[in-house]
Image (tube, rainbow, N blue to C red):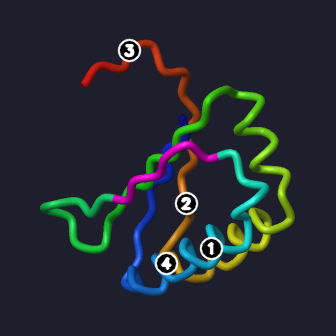
Amino acid sequence: MQILEFNTKRAGEVETLMNEWRTQTQSTRTVKREVMAKHLSRPDHYVAIVEFSSFQEAQKNSKLPETDRFNAQMTKLCDGPIEFSDYDVVRDKS
């Protein structure tokens, strides 16, 4: 699982960029699930949680040229750096 934390005043453009990436990588991406959430008390602060079936699948996804382009565009839409954190899921209950 990867978590991205970022600040932006251009959330609509970020969402459009995410949708474009999904369209461009429809047959090649390895993302199982993605969620974007807005912080309740910190305006313009967001997290994106991206799930993969394995670390290897996450690495494969990050090597896609579309992912490189996405990251470059995302950086331009954010107010400051994007913080990337990688996690191994140790518990998943519904």
- Secondary structure, mark 1, is helix
- Secondary structure, mark 2, is loop
Pointer 2 residue: 82
Write the start and end of the magenta stretch as one range.
31-36
- The residue at 69%/45% (across/down) is 30
Pointer 4 residue: 14
Pointer 3 residue: 91
- The residue at 69%/71% (across/down) is 70
In the rendered image, which quarter is residue 77 located in? bottom right
User: Which is more N-terminal, label 4 or label 1?
Assistant: 4
- Secondary structure, mark 4, is helix
Relative image position of residue 93 (x, y in whole percent): 29, 19
Residue 63 vertical position relative to residue 22 in the rendered view, above or below: above
**Residue 19 falls left or right of residue 23:** left
Q: Nearer the viewer, residue 24 or 10?
A: 24
Structural distance between the alpha carbons of marks 4 and 2: 12 Å
Structural distance between the alpha carbons of marks 3 and 2: 26 Å
In the rendered image, which quarter is residue 38 located in? bottom left
User: Which is more N-terminal, label 1 or label 2?
Assistant: 1
Structural distance between the alpha carbons of marks 1 and 4: 10 Å
Which one is in front in this view, the residue at disc 4 or the one at disc 2?
Answer: 4
- Secondary structure, mark 3, is loop
Residue 58 vertical position relative to residue 15 in the rendered view, above or below: above
Tell me whether the residue at label 4 lies in contact with that at label 2, contact meaning CB atoms closer than 8 angstroms: no
